[in-house]
Image: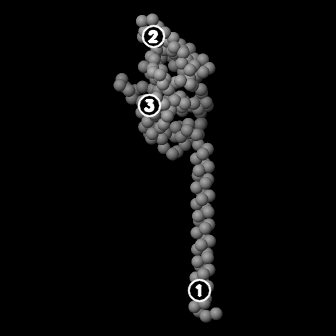
Amino acid sequence: MTPSDASRWALLFADLEAQLAAEEAAEREGAVAELTRAEQASVGLTDRLRAADGPLRVELRDGEVLEGRVAHVADTWLQLDAHGARGRVQHVVPLAGVAGLVGLGPHARPSAARTDRLGLGTALRGLQRDRARVQVRTASGQVVGRIARVGADHLDVAEVDRARPVSRVVPFAALLRVSEA
């Protein structure tokens, strides 16, 4: 074997090693990408909301936009602290009423509190107990009053500002938000 044959063989094997290394790197990158996609697929919206640490824009199904910071996240609703015309206002927003979010980062934080499992009815019963004046918004409009009753899947709002008070029944499925009035 001549020196030129030896260097050709060395180059050939070096090239084969480089090709094999490139294939292994591509395979690793593909596996990492697939594992990343699988991990992302297991992350729920509530876990991402719990990790939110900055201002958030919440777009409701009727086109209304709320801007504020996440104060609490439960499995089916979130509490948003925002600024309104009269200062700070809090909103309870069922996740089913959310059409989109802007400002939500990629990070997630799993539930760590037992209160995260509280249903929407529990949050609304707290407002009922406090006799809080609320604004209840649905896709068909809004009503201002006090929560008179909270059922398993609905609430009754007593519209107290009317000449003749009216009690309006609102199914949870119709709720977009319940806010301080």
- Please give the residue where the numbered disc 2 appears in the rendered image: 160
The reply to whether the C-beta atoms of the residues labelled 2 and 3 are less than 8 Å apart is no
Q: Three-letter amino acid code at disc 3?
A: Gly
Which residue is at the far front?
140
**Numbered label attached to residue 8:** 1
Badge 3: how crowded within 10 Å, few (<14), some, or many (20+)? few
Residue 144, position as x, y percentages in the image:
44, 16
Q: Residue at x 49, y 39 (%)?
A: 52
- How far separated are the C-alphas under marks 2 and 3? 27 Å
Q: Residue 151 is drawn in which quadrant?
A: top right
Q: Earlier in the sequence, mark 2 or mark 1?
A: 1
Badge 2: how crowded within 10 Å, few (<14), some, or many (20+)? some
Q: Residue at x 57, y 19 (%)?
A: 154
- How far separated are the C-alphas under marks 1 and 3? 69 Å
Q: Nearer the viewer, mark 1 or mark 3?
A: 3
Residue 133, position as x, y percentages in the image:
45, 16
**55 or 176: which is nearer to us?**
176
- How far separated are the C-alphas under marks 2 and 1? 93 Å
Q: Is residue 82 at all visible to an observer of this figure?
A: yes
Q: Three-letter amino acid code at disc 2?
A: Val
Which residue is at the far right?
1
In the picture shown, does residue 80 fall above or below 2?
above
**40 or 180: which is nearer to us?**
40
Q: Callout 1: helix, strand or loop?
A: helix
Q: Earlier in the sequence, mark 2 or mark 3?
A: 3
- Please give the residue where the numbered disc 3 appears in the rendered image: 63
